[in-house]
Structures are given as structure tokens and as C-alpha cells.
Image: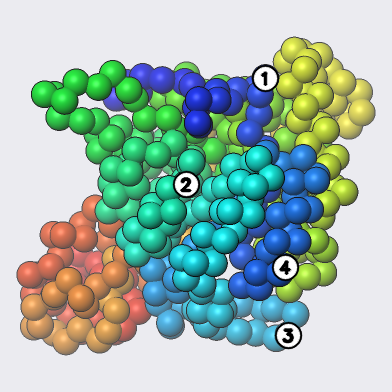
């Protein structure tokens, strides 16, 4: 097991820890691309106690194939690809959001989903970046993100220990400077424990894994929370050592955003922030005892779990589907030489078949297709 050498998560000279938690309001795409609503969300999240506000820089083609399938929305079923296309906004939009956020004295955070969004986002000089759970195995994106040498949150939903080790190895190797450029710095990384289920059951969180992950990998840990309760999981996560807590934020759960049904409206987010600050001020034992008295010891014990990293029951079916794999961007004929522009590293989701992991991206180009590969489908060993 590789030795990762730092447990501090530092941004702009500030060290975040269980005693000084980075509270992240994940706006994601709740703004719907409307700058007026985005500004309203920023103001409400800041008022509710967030000291960091997160966006997602979406370009549909970086995330999935047009044939990925449909999702149910209040107005009816819609192509997931088309929904993401509707949410696409250029760098000027995010530059304004960054200015609006930083004007309130809080951190601007944004998630890239591919090389284009990372390139545009890095030009805005954000204070930190985040890689979402489905991109934890996206080798090329991890390398390019680490090369930016910006403090990084890595989300670990729907992953196994080996996936986390591979991702951290890429980040640390890419961050390192050549030996002749002596630099004692190490990547500022926070590994965000997450369950890729919407909503995620509180009893599957296994929050003792925060201590396990920190001990195994030597990194700071945090929580990206998709449970509905504003206090239980976030409070216990801080007791278990979380340096950062991220929660989806909305103005109302009845709003049309993709994640609004499982997000926290302002009053609930304020409750979460208060619970986090209480947990930060208490020792671990006191925090657990107080929550056990309020919620029952059996529930608290179930949420804490046993600390063994495993796929949660509610996310098992997502493994190799929400993660990235190699897909055909167009029909590839049998006997055709596979070129770089014919393949993409995409999320599979529910309809298409998964392909080879992203680490094979450069090894597939130049190979001959053994089978006909329909557009959108994953490219397997037997296809080359």
C-alpha cells in the first residue's frame, strides 16, 4: 500500500479539521442555468452558514452518451443527455458565480467532468476543486486535475479500497515535481466518504470508515452526504473526524433541479451547520452520547457501522455504471481501426453496457475492432 504523507487539508492558508469544518453547500445545477436564481442560492447558502459554495461545470458530452436513457422529472421523462445539455453554461457564467461567492468572503468550489471543463475552470483560478464519485476512476481527468496543483476534494462513493488507492496514487504522482525542482509540498487532499444513492439511507453510512480511510491512506477525510436528515449523519461524521461536510442545497425541495428532492432548504441547512459546529466543539464521546440520547443508541450504532470500507447496499448496483468506462461515440464497424475520436470515457448509467476501465483509453486506439460496436455501448476486451 502506497504511503500518502499528509493529513492536513489546507486551502488559502487555512487548515480545515474536525475543529474547523469546511461546510459546503452543493448548489450543483439547482440554479438551472439562471444567473438570478444562482445569486439567490448563493445568498441563501451563505446566510445558512456555508463557508464554501459548490457548482458543477456541465458539458453533456463530457459526461455521457446521447443514448444513455431517460430520467423522470416533474414535467415527464426526459433524456438525461438533453437535460445536461440544457444546463450547459460557459466560463463567463462561472466567473460571475465565483465573484458573487467570493464577495461574501466564502470559497468558490466547482466540479469539472472532463478536460474541457477542467481547462475552463482552471483559468478562473479557483481556490479548490472537486472530483465527483463517478470520476474517481477517470485516469486522464485525475492526472490533469492534479497537475493544476490546487487543493482537491476526492469523492469516494460507489468505490472500493483499491479504487481509492489508485486515484490517490495518480494524484500524488502527478502533483510531484521532478527531483531537480525540490519542493517539499504535498497535495492538499480531502477524501470525501459518500454513498451514491439518492437519498442515501442513514444506517448505511458506516461513518467509522472515516477514521479507517485516514489511517490507511494518511489523508484528511470528509463527508459528501445524500441522506435527508440535516443533523444525524453530518454531526456523527464530524465526531469521526470529518474536516469537510458537503450537502446539496436548494431553495425548496419542490424546485425542478435534478438534486432538489434530496437537497436541504435554507432552514434545514442552517440546522445542519449548527449541528456541525456543536460537534466540532465537543469531544467524540460526548457528541456520540448526546446523539444516542436524542435518536437512540441502536440508530447511532448503525450509522457509525464497523469502519470496514465496502460498497453500501443501496449503491452496489451502481458499481461500473455510474463510474467511468470506455464507450463508442459512434458505430464502430468490425475490422475498423479504432481511433481516438471514436471513443470516450463516459458514465454508463442504466441502459448501456459498461466498457473497459479508463486506464485502457490509450491502449485501445490503434486496435482493430473484432466485433461491431454500436454507438454508445461500452468497449469490452472481446471487442478488440
Q: Earlier in the sequence, mark 1 or mark 4?
A: 1
Q: Are marks 1 and 3 in contact (CB under 8 Å)?
A: no
Mark 3 vs mark 4: which is more N-terminal?
Answer: 4
- What is the C-alpha distance between the residues marked 1 and 4? 33 Å
Decide which of 330, 319 is in the foreground and name it: 330
Crowding at dot 1, Cα within 10 Å, few <14 / some 14-19 / many 20+, comes out as many
The residue carrying mark 1 is 19
- Residue under pointer 3: 75
Give the camera-side residue of 148 and 12. 12
Q: Answer with mark 1 or mark 3, whichever residue precedes in sequence.
A: 1
- Labels 2 and 4: the sequence-earlier one: 4
**SS assignment at label 4:** helix
Q: Is residue 179 left or right of residue 324?
A: left
Residue 58: % across, % down: 49, 67
Q: Tell me the residue at 47%/46% (across/down).
A: 126
Indicate the position of residue 133 as horizontal and vertical percent values: 49, 50
Q: Residues within 10 Å of mark 2 (few under 14, many from 20)?
A: some
Residue appearing at x 60%, y 23% in the figure: 17
Residue occupying the point 69% across, 26% down? 238
Amino acid at each position: 500500500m502506497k504511503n500518502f504523507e499528509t493529513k492536513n487539508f489546507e486551502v488559502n492558508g487555512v487548515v480545515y479539521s474536525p475543529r474547523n469544518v469546511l461546510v459546503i453547500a452543493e448548489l450543483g445545477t439547482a440554479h438551472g442555468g439562471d444567473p438570478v436564481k444562482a445569486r439567490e442560492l448563493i445568498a441563501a447558502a451563505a446566510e445558512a452558514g456555508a463557508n464554501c459554495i459548490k457548482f458543477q461545470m456541465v458539458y453533456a458530452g463530457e459526461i455521457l452518451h446521447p443514448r444513455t436513457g431517460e430520467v423522470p422529472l416533474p414535467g415527464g421523462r426526459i433524456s438525461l443527455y438533453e437535460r445536461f445539455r440544457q444546463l450547459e453554461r460557459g466560463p463567463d457564467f462561472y466567473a460571475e458565480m465565483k465573484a458573487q461567492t467570493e464577495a461574501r468572503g466564502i470559497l468558490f468550489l466547482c466540479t469539472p467532468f472532463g478536460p474541457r471543463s477542467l481547462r475552463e475552470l482552471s483559468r478562473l483560478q479557483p481556490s479548490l476543486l472537486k472530483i465527483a464519485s463517478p470520476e474517481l476512476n477517470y485516469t486522464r481527468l485525475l492526472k490533469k486535475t492534479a497537475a493544476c496543483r490546487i487543493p482537491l476534494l476526492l469523492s469516494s462513493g460507489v468505490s472500493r479500497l483499491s479504487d481509492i488507492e489508485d486515484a490517490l496514487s495518480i494524484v500524488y504522482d502527478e502533483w510531484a515535481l521532478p527531483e531537480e525542482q525540490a519542493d517539499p509540498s504535498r497535495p492538499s487532499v480531502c477524501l470525501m466518504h459518500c454513498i451514491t444513492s439518492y437519498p442515501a439511507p442513514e444506517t448505511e453510512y458506516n461513518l467509522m470508515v472515516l477514521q479507517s480511510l485516514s489511517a490507511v491512506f494518511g489523508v484528511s477525510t470528509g463527508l459528501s452526504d445524500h441522506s435527508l436528515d440535516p443533523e444525524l449523519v453530518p454531526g456523527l461524521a464530524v465526531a469521526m473526524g470529518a474536516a469537510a461536510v458537503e450537502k446539496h442545497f436548494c431553495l425548496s425541495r419542490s424546485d425542478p433541479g435534478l438534486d432538489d428532492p434530496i437537497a436541504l432548504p435554507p432552514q434545514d441547512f442552517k440546522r445542519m451547520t449548527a449541528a456541525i459546529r456543536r460537534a466540532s466543539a465537543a469531544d467524540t464521546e460526548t457528541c456520540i452520547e448526546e446523539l444516542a440520547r436524542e435518536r437512540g443508541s441502536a440508530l447511532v450504532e448503525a450509522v457509525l457501522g464497523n469502519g470496514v470500507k465496502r460498497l453500501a447496499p443501496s449503491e452496489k448496483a451502481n458499481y461500473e455504471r455510474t463510474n467511468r468506462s470506455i464507450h463508442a461515440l459512434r458505430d464502430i464497424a468490425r475490422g475498423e481501426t479504432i481511433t481516438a475520436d471514436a471513443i470516450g470515457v463516459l458514465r454508463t448509467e442504466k441502459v448501456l453496457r459498461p466498457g473497459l476501465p479508463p486506464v485502457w483509453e490509450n491502449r485501445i486506439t490503434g486496435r482493430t475492432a473484432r466485433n461491431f460496436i454500436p454507438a454508445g455501448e461500452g468497449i469490452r476486451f472481446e471487442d478488440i
